[in-house]
């Protein structure tokens, strides 16, 4: 899993880094929770006690729209992928750095990133239809002009005297 790590300091300075985690090697606390939790569900964590899921919604993480679950623990706001139970977003104030920190998943091999168009799908389809219509019109006029030219040549050939 690849994460974008951002630190915003009190003076407004923003630092960014990339963080990579390998689940086979091990991960930080609360990177993994039980899968398929819903709002109101509670799970127990050794370091944080009982944690209550306070929301479910759909958001884009790792290039795909995912159903996620949310919980707040102290000054930390966690978001996990509901199906996989892995952390996708974490926001908290780090007292050591005296900065707000955000750790957000930007890539993973646990699910496929979805292809997304750089424009609104409706506009994309309208452009495709317009291009197809233009091609059909051009082909129609090209064929009709060719038939007219061919017809003129036949008439000239037929007028030859013997």
Image (spheres, rainbow, N blue to C red):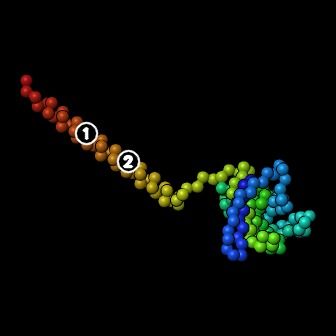
* Residue 53 locus on image (x, y percent): 81, 68
| 129 on left or right of 61 | left
Q: In front: 19, or 72?
A: 19
Mark on residue 49? Answer: none
Work out how far the residue at label 2 is from the one at label 1, CA to CA, in angstroms.
18 Å
Q: Which quadrant holds residue 15? A: bottom right
For disc 2, the marked residue is 135
Of the numbered discs 2 and 1, the one sitting upstream in the chain is: 2
Q: Judging from the image, what secondary structure is the residue with disc 2 in?
A: helix
Residue depicted at x 22% and y 41%: 148
The residue positioned 48% from the left and 59% from the top of the image is: 123
Position in image of residue 109 (x %, y %): 72, 49
Q: Which residue is drawn at 15% across and 34% down?
A: 155
Q: Mark 1 points at which residue?
A: 147
Residue 36 picture quarter: bottom right
Vertical placement of residue 62 versus 10, above or below: above
Figure label count? 2
Give x and y (percent) for residue 54: 79, 70
Q: Which of marks 2 and 1 is in front?
A: 2
Q: Who's the residue at 67% across and 60% down the image?
A: 60
Of 82 and 72, which appears nearest the observer?
A: 72
The spot of residue 133 in percent (x, y) is 39, 51
Few, some or many residues within 10 Å of mark 2 (<14, 14–19, 20+): few
Tell me if 123 is positioned left or right of 11 in this view.
Answer: left
């Amino acid at each position: 899993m690849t994460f974008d790590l951002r630190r915003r300091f009190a003076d407004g300075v923003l630092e960014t880094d990339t963080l990579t985690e390998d689940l086979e090697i091990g991960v930080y606390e609360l990177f993994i929770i039980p899968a398929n939790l819903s709002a109101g569900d509670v799970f127990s964590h050794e370091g944080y006690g009982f944690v209550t899921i306070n929301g479910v919604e759909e958001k884009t993480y790792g290039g795909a729209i995912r159903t996620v679950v949310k919980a707040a623990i102290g000054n930390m706001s966690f978001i996990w992928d509901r199906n996989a139970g892995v952390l996708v977003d974490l926001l908290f104030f780090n007292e050591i750095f005296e900065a707000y920190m955000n750790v957000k998943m930007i890539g993973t091999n646990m699910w496929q990133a979805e292809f997304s168009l750089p424009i609104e799908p409706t506009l994309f389809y309208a452009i495709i239809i317009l291009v197809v219509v233009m091609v059909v019109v051009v082909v129609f006029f090209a064929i009709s002009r060719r038939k007219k030219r061919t017809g003129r040549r036949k008439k000239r050939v037929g007028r030859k005297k013997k």
